[in-house]
């Protein structure tokens, strides 16, 4: 199977990942069919070998000098290091150590070097960030001044685009280290231990001698993965390695013409046996997203109760911008409420487990050990549940936003850049809700889904998007609701300019401002990151902002305007619609087929005819109440209008006959009659 993707004009390669499950395999040496549990066991033995070699390699090179050498991209001879991590480590001479008595091939060592190289390359960014924070350590770590914030952002590479929450998290980590050791750490390698190695097989680092992947000829959704796995935990020779063929079923998100790549295998353990998940990468040709030249854009504003507010704007040939429709909102109140409940429950579990740990101490036979294990498992379950809800919410919101852009015919989505937003000064509850939002994950998923259709996703500065009017850029006056303009609030916005007169939801005005700002700044200030391809408008230009206004569209005339006659009066029929039903009734035992059911409809307020029908047993209740129960002769009796006349449950529900109370303090007598004529007289009379 060829791994080369052919591209046409205006197309780019797009790589995504699909998840599949290994449900079994076949041992090609013996022809034995292997269950999913046996395959998971063999994959677990291979991942154990790879994880052990990766951990030993990281322990030997987890220092500032080696990470800096790898980050420079040059070897000792001045040659450029390869892009593959395992090849770069071999160029530098960083080999792996195979455990004694174990026989592995060169491809197993490649996977260990690839995983270690990726971790070491990612450590360079953390090292630069911690070095910048330590170089500009503030006088009060809990509260930086504006000058200290400027200093720390200048000391960190690309610090201006770094979210403030990341800097605060690293500051708290360093503060905890100072409290424990009484000194500042030297660098991130002194601050953190060697990273934990994940148990997985990165098959992208091997060749056909270790793993192959072929698509079925008759069904493009079925592929066959062949790889070498050990038949015992400690393979002593190459005889202890065997080829295993594992069929995979691709999800429908993988197109038939996509180019497949070797997956990454992740074994998991559980009470019902282990499973192996395959993260299968595939490449496909998609339309190229352009950073500029857009005429129709979708603006998206973030909210708290309303997660997303979006609407489309169009740039006219004369330079004016108009809104297309009133916009829409994405509400996720139920999911967010569930998230808050799980968060509070997780915090409660954390507090209880911490208390148990203090009580247990170093006593392994303490009677609270079993309870601590149960609470720890429950805490992990709650954390997994929260993660699942966040993932589902992020994908749902991103899918909704991209669908809005496709429906409006937009070629670009402008989103607020809220990386620098801090959850502070708004109360404990509101600060927590803001910090728990998954905005970054939503934007990432939005970029992934929009790239499939060639729609660009551009972040714009959020300055004054909700403060100024979208039609005249004057500061808005906010209130609670349109019918309460005098009460201070934040939801409803009113423009104080009498010539403009715009008013509407605060979020609807914000997405208009975001879309207009993006359309006017797209040719001047847009920046494309070469490494990630992300597009952003980093700053606002006053000259361009002055033209970022939404021109109001023509509105329909009110019903109280000109109502003069504009044409002849339409002719009305002289035969009114009969009030008698023309369709025959359903045949029954009491009447012949075709009889008209009810005749003319009554215009008075008499009860319907169903009230006069025989309803069955008539019950007359005579109460003999004990003197122990208080009574009131002046209290009016309840007289059900519909139920007493047999009109059905629409007027009143029919009650079942009351039960006979056999207690000695109550005695109830029932006089039951089954006289239909008495019921008919009661209805008519």
Image (cartoon, rainbow, N blue to C red):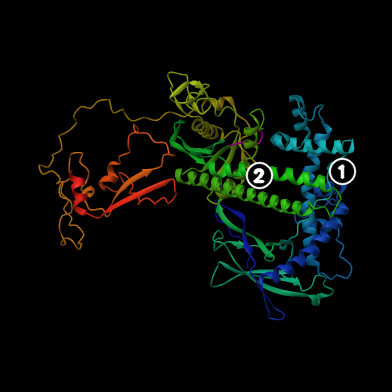
Q: Secondary structure at mark 2?
A: helix
Q: Can residue 525 be seen from the camera position used here? A: yes
Residue 623 vertical position relative to residue 56 in the rendered view, above or below: above
Which residue is under mark 2? Answer: 345
Tag 1: Cα neighbours inside 10 Å, few (<14), some, or many (≥20)?
some
Which residue appears at 41% of the width and 46% of the height? Answer: 666
| Residue 216: quadrant of the picture | bottom right
Quadrant that contains the C terminus = top left
Q: Position of 610 compared to 659: left or right? A: left
Mark before the other along the chain sequence, 1 or 2: 1
Q: Can residue 290 be seen from the camera position used here? A: no
Q: Nearer the viewer, residue 443 or 215?
A: 443
Point out the frontmost of discs 1 and 2.
2
In the picture, the disc for residue 190 is 1
Q: Secondary structure at mark 1?
A: helix
Residue 93 vertical position relative to residue 465 in the rendered view, above or below: below
State yes or no: discs 1 and 2 in contact (Cβ < 8 Å). Answer: no
The x, y position of residue 174, in whole percent, is 82, 37
Quadrant that contains the N terminus = bottom right
Tag 2: Cα neighbours inside 10 Å, few (<14), some, or many (≥20)?
some
Which residue appears at 41% of the width and 50% of the height? Answer: 661
The x, y position of residue 40, in whole percent, is 70, 67
Give the residues in magenta.
Answer: 416-421
Residue closest to the far left: 574
The x, y position of residue 363, in whole percent, is 86, 51
In the picture, the disc for residue 417 is none
């Amino acid at each position: 199977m060829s791994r080369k993707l052919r591209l046409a004009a205006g197309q780019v390669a797009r790589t995504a990942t699909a998840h599949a499950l290994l449900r079994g395999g076949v041992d090609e040496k013996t022809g034995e069919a292997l269950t999913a549990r046996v395959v998971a066991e063999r994959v677990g033995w291979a991942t154990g070998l790879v994880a052990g070699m990766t951990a030993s390699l990281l322990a030997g090179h987890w220092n500032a000098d080696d990470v800096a050498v790898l980050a420079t991209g040059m070897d000792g001879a001045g040659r450029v290091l390869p892009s593959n991590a395992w090849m770069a480590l071999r160029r530098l001479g960083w080999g792996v150590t195979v455990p004694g008595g174990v026989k592995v091939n060169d491809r197993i060592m490649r996977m260990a070097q690839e995983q270690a190289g990726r971790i070491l390359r990612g450590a360079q960014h953390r090292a630069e960030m911690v070095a910048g924070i330590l170089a500009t350590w503030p006088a009060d770590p809990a509260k930086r001044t504006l000058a200290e914030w400027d200093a720390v952002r200048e000391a960190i590479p690309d610090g201006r685009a770094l979210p403030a929450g990341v800097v605060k998290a690293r500051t708290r980590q360093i503060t905890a280290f100072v409290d424990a050791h009484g000194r500042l750490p030297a660098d991130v390698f002194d601050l953190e231990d060697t990273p934990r190695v994940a148990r997985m097989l990165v098959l992208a680092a091997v060749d056909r001698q270790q793993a192959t992947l072929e698509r079925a000829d008759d069904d493009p959704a079925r592929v066959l993965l062949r790889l070498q796995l050990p038949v015992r935990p400690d393979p002593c020779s190459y005889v202890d390695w065997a080829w295993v063929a594992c069929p995979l079923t691709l999800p429908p998100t993988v197109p038939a013409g996509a180019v497949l790549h070797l997956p990454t295998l992740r074994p998991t353990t559980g009470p019902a046996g282990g499973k192996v998940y395959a993260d299968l990468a595939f490449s496909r040709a998609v339309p190229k997203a352009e950073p500029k030249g857009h005429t129709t854009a979708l603006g998206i504003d973030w909210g708290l109760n309303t997660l997303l507010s979006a609407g489309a704007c169009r740039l006219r040939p004369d330079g004016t911008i108009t809104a297309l429709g009133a916009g829409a909102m994405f509400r996720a109140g139920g999911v967010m409420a569930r998230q808050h409940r799980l968060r509070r429950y997780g915090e409660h579990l954390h507090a209880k487990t911490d208390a148990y740990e203090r009580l247990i101490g170093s006593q392994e036979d303490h009677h609270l050990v079993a309870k601590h294990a149960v609470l720890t498992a429950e805490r992990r379950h709650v954390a997994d549940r929260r993660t699942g809800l966040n993932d589902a919410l992020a994908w749902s919101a991103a899918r909704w936003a991209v669908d809005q852009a496709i429906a409006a015919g937009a070629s670009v989505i402008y989103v607020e850049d809220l990386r620098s937003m801090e959850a502070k000064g708004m109360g404990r509850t509101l600060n927590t809700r803001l910090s728990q939002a998954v905005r970054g994950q939503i934007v990432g998923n939005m970029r992934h889904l929009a790239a499939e259709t060639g729609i660009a996703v551009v972040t714009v500065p959020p300055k004054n998007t909700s403060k100024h009017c979208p039609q005249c850029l004057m500061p808005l006056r906010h209130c609670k609701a349109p019918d309460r303009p005098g009460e201070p609030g934040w939801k409803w916005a009113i423009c104080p300019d009498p010539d403009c007169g715009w008013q509407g939801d605060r979020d609807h005005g914000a997405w208009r401002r975001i879309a207009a700002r993006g359309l006017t700044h797209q040719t001047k200030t847009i920046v494309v990151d070469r490494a990630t391809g992300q597009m952003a408008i980093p700053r606002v230009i006053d000259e361009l902002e002055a033209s970022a206004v939404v021109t109001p569209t023509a509105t329909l005339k009110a019903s109280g305007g000109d109502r003069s006659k504009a044409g002849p009066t339409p002719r009305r029929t002289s035969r009114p619609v009969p009030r008698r039903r023309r369709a025959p009734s359903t045949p029954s035992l009491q009447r012949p087929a075709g009889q008209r059911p009810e005749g003319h409809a009554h215009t008075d307020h008499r009860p319907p005819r169903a009230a006069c029908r025989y309803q069955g047993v008539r019950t007359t209740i005579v109460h003999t109440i004990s003197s122990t129960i208080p009574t009131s002769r002046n209290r009016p009796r309840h007289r059900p209008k519909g139920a007493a006349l047999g009109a059905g449950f629409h007027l009143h529900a029919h009650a079942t006959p009351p039960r006979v109370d056999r207690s000695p303090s109550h005695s109830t007598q029932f006089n039951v009659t089954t006289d239909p004529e008495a019921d008919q007289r009661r209805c008519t009379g």
